[in-house]
Amino acid sequence: DTHFLDNISVVSPGSSLPIIADANDPASAVSNLQDGVNTFTWTVSSALGACTIPPAVLTITKNPQPVTVDIPFNLCETNFGSLQTDSHDLTIHDAAVSNNEPDRTVTWFLDAALTSPVLPDPTSVDISDNDIFYARVVDDITGCTNVTPILNPGSVTFNVNPLPTVAAPSLASRSFCEDGLGTSNHAGVNLATAYNAQINPTATITWFPTLA
């Protein structure tokens, strides 16, 4: 709340007021506008107070800049040893980088100054480990951006993880005798117990009957 006593204003702790460059100039510049509604009242009277006119009220609404977020994101490399993910869609990060606010349009850039857009297609970008991409965010309702008056680009930083290594189980552990003459069958084998440690002892392994 703001309370006015004569020419003294009393505001809540931590509040900030707009600054009028010249209170006697109807065309004065105003700075330090606060987000939301800013109301200015001018009162004009004669020097002796004999003549007065109703005060003039001007309301200025300052819309806030869109909020942006810097986010980390983990990927897996596409090919062994490359530390690169092929054809990643940057637009899946639009919501997160714009703080999950509705009515936002996001454009992706290669630099924090937002001068080099991601071309030709931000939905298919090759990502290397530690790559950073930056977002220009527009509020579709107000038209405000994260560029002016203060440049505050959101970003996504990628960590491309290597694919897990695998080793083929030993031939001996994969060789069996049939249980009965001519049956070509062998009793069930616990694949996880028999082979997981040989393939990769630190990985989580899931078995499937086919490659599909």
Image: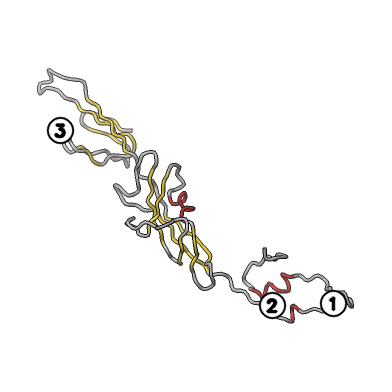
Reading the chain from its start, which is encountered first: label 1 or label 2? Answer: 2
- Type of residue at label 1? Glu
Q: Nearer the viewer, mark 1 or mark 2?
A: 1
Location of mark 3 (residue) = 25
Q: How is the image coloured?
A: secondary structure
Residue at mark 2 to residue at mark 3: CA–CA distance? 87 Å
At mark 1, the secondary structure is: loop
Disc number at residue 178?
A: 1
Location of mark 2 (residue) = 169
Q: Is residue 122 above or below residue 167?
A: above
Residue 49 position within the rendered picture, expressed as x and y whole percent measured from the top left: 13, 20
Q: Is residue 94 above or below residue 132?
A: above
Rate crowding at label 2 as few (under 14), some (14 to 19) or many (20 or more) other CA atoms within 10 Å. Answer: some
The residue most toward the top is: 50
Q: Is residue 126 above or below residue 53?
A: below
- Type of residue at label 3? Asp
Tags 1 and 2 touching, CB below 8 Å: no
Reading the chain from its start, which is encountered first: label 1 or label 3? Answer: 3
Closest to the observer, 180 or 203: 180
What quarter of the picture does the C terminus occupy? bottom right
Q: Nearer the viewer, mark 2 or mark 3?
A: 2
Residue at left 73%, top 71%?
193
Residue at left 45%, top 50%?
94
Please indicate whether residue 204 sits to the left or right of residue 52 in the image. right
The residue most toward the front is: 120
Rate crowding at label 3 as few (under 14), some (14 to 19) or many (20 or more) other CA atoms within 10 Å. Answer: few
